[in-house]
Structures are given as C-alpha cells and as structure tokens.
C-alpha cells in the first residue's frame, strides 16, 4: 500500500498569506491519480484538484497543484477566510486508494 | 445536479452489522464507480472499497475483506454497504463517493453527506 505523508500537520497563517502544503508518497504515484480535497467541520470532503494540477469545477484559481513522482504540493496563493480548513491528498494505485493524514490550515 | 443522499445515523452494539445506503441522482448510475470511505473522529479518510454499478463487481480494501459487502440496486440507483462484526473502532462517519470508470484521471466527486455509525455497548 502506498503511504501518503502530509506536512506540516498544522499551518498557522493570516488571511491574504500564501499557503504551501506538501504530500509525499512512499513510492512513485501516477500524477493522473493524485487529488486534493478540502474538508470543513461537519462536512464531507470537497474535490479541489485532480490529476495533480487540474482544478475541479468551480474551484477558484488561487488554488493550484503541482508535483510528480513522490512529491506533490497544494498552494493557496492568498488565503481567504473560507479557506481555513483541513486538506487531504489522495492517490490511486494497485487497485486501492489511500489518503494522507491531512494538513490543518488555521487562522494565526 | 449530481447528488448522493445517504441513509441516517445508526447506533449498533458490538458484534452487530450495519447497512448504509447511498442513493444517486443527476447522472447515469452505471457510468461511475461508487466508493465507500470512512472517517473516524479526528482522523483522515480511509477507503473501504468500491462497486461497479454496471455489473456489480466489487473491489474491497484489504483491511475490510471478509467484513464488508457492497451491493447495488440499479432500479433505484442505490448502492449499499454492509459491515459485519462491528467493534468500537468502527465508530466513524461513512461516506459514499463517485469516481470515474473510464478516462485519464481519477477522483472522488461528489461525496454523500455522510452517515454516522456509532458502535457502543
């Protein structure tokens, strides 16, 4: 099973600042099968990025994804108040899906 | 619009079974896999398995093999997830989530609203 490790565990930032979230895989992952999700308290996760760098429908362009192989990054260029949440990366490989443990972006 | 609506919260005793439903609407039911994902309190999501609504074939996560069964009813566009031998560690919110069968990319979208399953004596 491919293990995804996200860092940092918590990111304390102010609105307007840039957020950089990391997702590292235990072995190489197909970029086509790497996605990012946002989850707010009491809600289901919401798809943000698929194929490592493609934004999902209605996702603002301040969200961007990059990376390949074992290292992937989600960047939020300028944090809006509604962006404070938990973010998860996800990958598909060998007929199974795995998720990272999440990065919480909190207001500083 | 595409929507997944799940059944309501459940409280079960250890050793019991639970069956959660997920009704799909707004798209061609047989054209997408349906996945089940659970999330324990304060934890990240954990994939349990998926079903192809077209033929009913399933793939289960290794951790859940032998305890989970996923089925579908094409007449009502509903999928079901049954988990047996419940223990306290199974207390979690259970989600269904759609993923593509064909195509270059893979993702989960949308997700159901979640069903809280509490296992307690």
Image (tube, coloured by chain):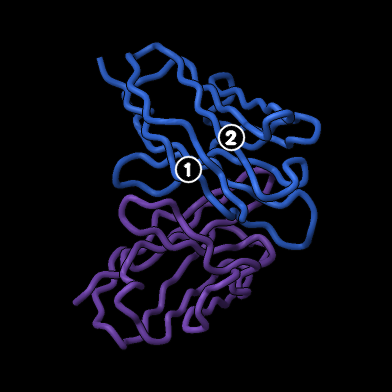
Label 2: which secondary element: loop
- Label 1 and label 2 in one chain: yes
Q: Chain of mark 1?
A: B
Q: Nearer the viewer, residue B32 or A89?
A: B32
Chain in blue in the render:
B
Palette colour of chain A: purple
* A21 over A38 or under it: above or below: below
Q: Chain of mark 2?
A: B
Q: Can you tell which quarter of the image residue B79 is in?
A: top right
Classify residue B91 as left or right of residue B56: left
Please tell me which of labels 1 and 2 falls first in the chain: 1
Query: Which quadrant: the C terminus of chain A?
Result: bottom left
The residue pinned by badge 1 equals B46
Tell me the crowding category of disc 2: few under 14, some 14 to 19, or many 20 or more residues within 10 angstroms, Cα based: some
Q: Nearer the viewer, residue B47 or A9?
A: B47
Residues under numbered marks 1 and 2 in contact, where contact means CB atoms less than 8 Å apart: yes
Q: Residue at x 56, y 35 (%)?
A: B22
Q: Residue at x 79, y 35 (%)?
A: B54
Q: Can you tell which quarter of the image residue A32 is in?
A: bottom right
- Which residue reaches farthest top? B15
The residue pinned by badge 2 equals B61
Query: Which quadrant: the N terminus of chain A?
Result: top right
Tell me the crowding category of disc 1: few under 14, some 14 to 19, or many 20 or more residues within 10 angstroms, Cα based: some
Q: Position of residue A62 (x, y in %)?
A: 47, 83
Q: Residue at x 62, y 57 (%)?
A: B107
Q: Residue at x 52, y 79 (%)?
A: A64
């Amino acid at each position: 099973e491919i293990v995804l490790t996200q860092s940092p565990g918590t990111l304390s930032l102010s609105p307007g600042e840039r957020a950089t979230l990391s997702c590292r895989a235990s072995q190489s992952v197909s970029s086509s099968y790497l996605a990012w999700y946002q989850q707010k308290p009491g809600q289901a996760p919401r798809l943000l990025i698929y194929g490592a760098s493609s934004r999902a429908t209605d996702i603002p362009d301040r969200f961007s994804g990059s990376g390949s192989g074992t290292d992937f990054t989600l960047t939020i260029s300028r944090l809006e108040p509604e962006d404070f949440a938990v973010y998860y990366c996800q990958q598909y490989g060998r007929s199974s899906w795995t998720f990272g443990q999440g990065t919480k972006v909190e207001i500083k | 619009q595409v929507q997944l609506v799940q059944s309501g919260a459940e409280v079960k005793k250890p050793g019991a079974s639970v069956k959660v439903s997920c009704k799909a609407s707004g798209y061609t039911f047989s054209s997408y896999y349906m996945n089940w994902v659970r999330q324990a309190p304060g934890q990240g999501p954990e994939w349990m398995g998926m079903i192809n609504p077209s033929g009913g074939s399933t793939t289960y996560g290794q951790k859940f093999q032998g305890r989970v069964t996923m089925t579908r009813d094409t007449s009502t566009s509903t999928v079901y997830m049954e988990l047996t031998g419940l223990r306290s560690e199974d207390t979690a919110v259970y989600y269904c989530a759609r993923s593509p069968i064909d195509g270059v990319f893979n993702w989960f979208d949308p997700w159901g609203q979640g069903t809280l399953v509490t296992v307690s004596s």
